[in-house]
Every structure is written in C-alpha cells, then in structure tokens.
Image (spheres, helix red, strand yellow):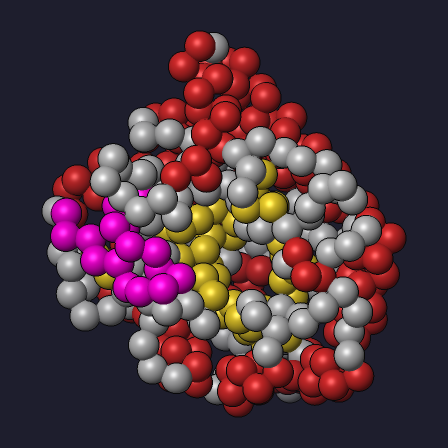
C-alpha cells in the first residue's frame, strides 16, 4: 500500500518529457496557461528571449514559478563564437571551441586550463540568470569535406584532443553548477549537409565511427561524473548501423550504440524536433523519438500551434528517465 501510494504520488508530480522554447523576452498569457497545463520538464532560451541579465533572470524566475519546481531545467546554447544566444553589447563574448583547439597545438595543458576557465566563466554568468543547463560542449569531429554547420564549433579533428578538451569543458560547467549537454551524440562531424535543412547520411563503417566519432562521447561517459551530464542526439542517418532511421529516432542506435557501446548513462535529449532532417508531422516525430529511447524531446521555435501538436503526443515520463534526471540508476 505504501509503495503504491509513493509511486502514485511520483506519477502525479512527473513533468512531461519535453523542453519548449518561447516566442520572446516576456511570457504571453497564452504561454503561461499552456505551460501550466502541459507541465514541461524545462525550457530553452534563444537570442529572442535574452535582452539583459535582469530581464533573463525575471524570465527564468517566472518559468520556475509556473512549474512549481525550483530546479526546473532551463537550457541555452552558449557555446561561444557563432553559436551564442547572449549577444553583445548586453553580454560578454566568448571564443569558439576551435580557438582552444588551435591553442592546444602550441600548449596542450594551457589549452585544457583555458577551456575549464572559459566554461566556468560562462557557467557563472548563466547561473546568475537562473539558467542551469548549457547545450555545450560540441564533441563532434568534423572531416575535411563536412558541411560547415559544425566547423569551428568543434575543438578539432583529433579524437584524443577533443576528448581531453571536452572533459575540461564539462568539468568547468559542473564546477559552476551548470549541467553540460554533450552533442551531437554519436557524432555529427561527417555530415555533408546541414541537418537543420535536410537529413545527413553517413556511410562509414562501424569500426571507423567507433575509433573516431564515438571516442570523445565515450571519454566523457566514463568519467566519475559522467551520469550527471546530458547528451543531445544527432539527426543523422548512419547507414551501417540503422539504414532506416536517424539516431534520434533509432532504437537500435540509442540502445546499442549510445547506451551500450558508448556507455552513456545520463539524460538523453533529442535535437530540435522541428529541424528539416526529420520526416513526418511533429506528433509523429515526438512519438518516434520517445519510443526510440529519448528521455526528453526538444522543441525550440516557440510557435504555439507546433508546441500544442507536440504536447498532444507526449506520454508520461518513464521512470527510468526520471531516475536519470535525479542521477540514479535503476536495476
């Protein structure tokens, strides 16, 4: 009776396994009503939502008041370089990952320390404003003919270097009280097209992917703090592992590659469901991603009609997903 009551209580309080964006710097009455009804796990901020530190702090406080959960995850993509949602002059500018990769060619240890300090500085800025999850670092390893969508967002092309600097970045964020999101697991560096617009196809052998692309993600997953890190999947089709579905929608890749091979045990979130790489309507994409093993799906553009479609397809959060969010493991 007691166990049943506890499980029932947890079930009632469980958030929906979705993270939503918002239209602007201030919540509309429609958004407030929608978020209170749907109870999303969290929210993600973009440049359209961020004007000043004071304004962002007020927005994150209002979002948490709506959910009633003080630790509601509020995400942002603050990588540095061209992927920065906090724009000058209102916010400081940070360098792209490649800056540190180039530094490592001259002094590897100095680069590692600089990555840690840079991540910690970004983390302290985010935490002051109530943002507690950063969608960084990028652990992809771009090949010479890859689409520029990754480019200087990556530390470099050496798996060992990317692993080392990726670990330093995660440690810097964690030291500041920020949850890092490694991306785009199991690797976006070989994509010849931009997954925002169309589906990339990667035809390399599992062996090559294993020793190059998967290596940085495995290095982070194996750290003692690895289960506290989140990961974001790649909307990429790996034909040698699943010729039919991109990683985000592939149970084969989620279960056997990300969870078993790479050994990632933390919270797994999709990249944006509205991206052009995915087919089907948003309800179909939502159901497919969660069925494949995503703990949480991500919808970014803040368009109410799209969010309503996603919300209609959202099931209750699985207990194993809830356990990962709390840093636990279920037997």
Image quadrant holding the N terminus, namely bottom right
From the viewer's perspective, tell me whether residue 65 is left or right of residue 109.
right
Quarter occupied by residue 29: bottom right
Image quadrant holding the C terminus, namely bottom left
Q: Where is residue 241? Give x, y as percent.
A: 17, 58
Q: Is residue 186 above or below residue 169?
A: below
Query: Magenta stretch mostly in which secondary structure?
Result: loop
Residue extending farthest to the top is: 106
Residue 194 magenta-highlighted: yes
The total number of labels drawn is 0
Q: Please report the bounds of the magenta region as a residue range.
A: 189-204
In depth, the one of 284 and 72 nearer the eye is: 284
From the viewer's perspective, tell me whether residue 202 is left or right of residue 173.
left
Q: Residue at x 48, y 17 (%)?
A: 103
Q: Is residue 265 above or below residue 316?
A: above
Residue extending farthest to the front is: 89
- Answer yes or no: is residue 96 visible: yes
Residue extending farthest to the bottom is: 312
Quarter occupied by residue 283: bottom left
Q: Where is residue 25? Give x, y as percent.
A: 76, 65
Q: Residue at x 40, y 62 (%)?
A: 196
Quarter occupied by residue 26: bottom right
Q: Residue at x 44, y 24 (%)?
A: 101
- Answer yes or no: is residue 329 visible: no
Q: Residue at x 47, y 66 (%)?
A: 272
Q: Where is residue 108? Give x, y as percent.
A: 46, 14
In depth, the one of 126 and 254 nearer the eye is: 126
Q: Where is residue 11? Give x, y as percent.
A: 62, 81
Residue 104 magenta-highlighted: no
From the viewer's perspective, tell me whether residue 86 is left or right of residue 312.
right
């Amino acid at each position: 009776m007691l166990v049943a009551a506890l499980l029932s209580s947890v079930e009632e309080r469980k958030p929906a396994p979705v993270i939503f964006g918002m239209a602007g710097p201030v919540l509309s009455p429609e958004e407030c009503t929608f978020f209170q009804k749907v109870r999303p796990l969290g929210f993600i901020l973009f440049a359209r939502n961020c004007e000043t530190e004071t304004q962002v702090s007020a927005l994150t406080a209002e979002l948490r008041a709506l959910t009633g959960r003080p630790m509601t995850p509020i995400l942002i993509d603050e990588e540095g370089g061209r992927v920065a949602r906090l724009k000058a002059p209102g916010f400081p500018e940070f360098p792209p990952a490649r800056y540190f990769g180039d530094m490592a060619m001259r002094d590897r240890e100095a680069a590692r320390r600089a990555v840690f300090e840079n991540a910690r500085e970004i983390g302290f800025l985010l935490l002051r404003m109530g943002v507690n999850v950063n969608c960084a670092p990028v652990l992809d390893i771009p090949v010479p003919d890859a689409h520029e969508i990754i480019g200087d967002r990556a530390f470099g092309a050496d798996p060992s270097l990317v692993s080392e600097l990726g670990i330093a970045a995660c440690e810097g964020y964690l030291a500041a009280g920020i949850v890092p999101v490694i991306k785009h697991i199991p690797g976006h560096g070989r994509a010849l097209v931009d997954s925002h617009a169309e589906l990339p196809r990667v035809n390399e052998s599992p062996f090559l992917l294993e020793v190059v692309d998967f290596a940085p993600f495995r290095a982070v997953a194996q750290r003692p703090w690895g289960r506290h890190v989140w990961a974001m999947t790649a909307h990429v089709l790996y034909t040698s592992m699943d010729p039919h579905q991109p990683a985000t929608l592939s149970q084969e890749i989620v279960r056997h590659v990300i969870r078993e091979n790479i050994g990632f045990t933390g919270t797994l979130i999709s990249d944006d469901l509205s991206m052009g790489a995915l087919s089907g309507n948003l309800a179909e994409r939502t159901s497919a991603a969660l069925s494949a093993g995503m703990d949480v799906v991500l919808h970014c553009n803040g368009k109410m009609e799209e969010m309503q479609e996603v919300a209609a397809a959202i099931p209750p959060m699985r207990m194993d997903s809830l356990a990962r969010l709390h840093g636990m493991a279920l037997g």
